[in-house]
Image (cartoon, helix red, strand yellow):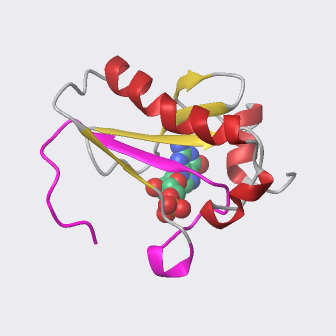
Amino acid sequence: MTDCLFCKIIAGEIPSAKVHEDDYCFAFRDVHPAAPAHILIVPKQHVGGLNNTELLPDAALAACLRAAKTIAAQEKLADGYRLVCNCGAHACQSVQHLHFHLLGGRQLTEKMG
Ligand code: DGP
């Protein structure tokens, strides 16, 4: 998609700190980290969010979820991590390209909201 920030990051048109890439997904550090490790895992194919995954091959969705374990190992998050996906306005989704936040590197709180 031409006017999508994350599509531009995936294409290398906007710089990012890449941590992982495979055929289906791309992962890079969040510009506003909420934890010592805060990485965004995104499918290379543009879909707006979790409500649009029917447009995405199952392999792409699986690649994003499986990348979490790979990245957690790279980031040495042996004590655990959290994977978050904001979907829509009430969840404060600000970039309309499906992405999963991988958060770790400190004790996260029990509070999810
Ligand atoms: P969300 O609120 O769930 O849509 O998360 C979007 C995230 O994207 C937010 O945590 C900040 C991050 N972000 C926004 N613009 C950029 C950017 O240009 N580069 C990087 N690396 N992250 C960005």
Q: In this view, does 46 lie above or below 11?
A: below
Asked whether 33 or 60 is in front, the reply is: 60
Asked whether 39 or 43 is in front, the reply is: 43
Q: Is residue 44 above or below residue 99?
A: above
Give the overall secondary structure of the magenta segment: loop
The quadrant the C terminus occupies is: bottom left
Res. 44 image quadrant: top right
Residue at left 75%, top 48%? 56
Residue at left 50%, top 38%? 65
Q: How far across and down, in percent of the image, does residue 48 sit?
A: 71, 61
Q: Is residue 35 left or right of residue 88?
A: left
Q: How far across and down, in percent of the image, does residue 20 sit?
A: 54, 23
Q: How far across and down, in percent of the image, does residue 17 sit?
A: 52, 29
Q: How far across and down, in percent of the image, does residue 12 sit?
A: 73, 31
Asked whether 36 or 108 is in front, the reply is: 108
Magenta span of residues: 88-113
Q: Is residue 14 magenta?
A: no
Residue at left 61%, top 61%? 50
Q: Is residue 3 left or right of residue 6?
A: right
Q: Is residue 36 left or right of residue 100?
A: left
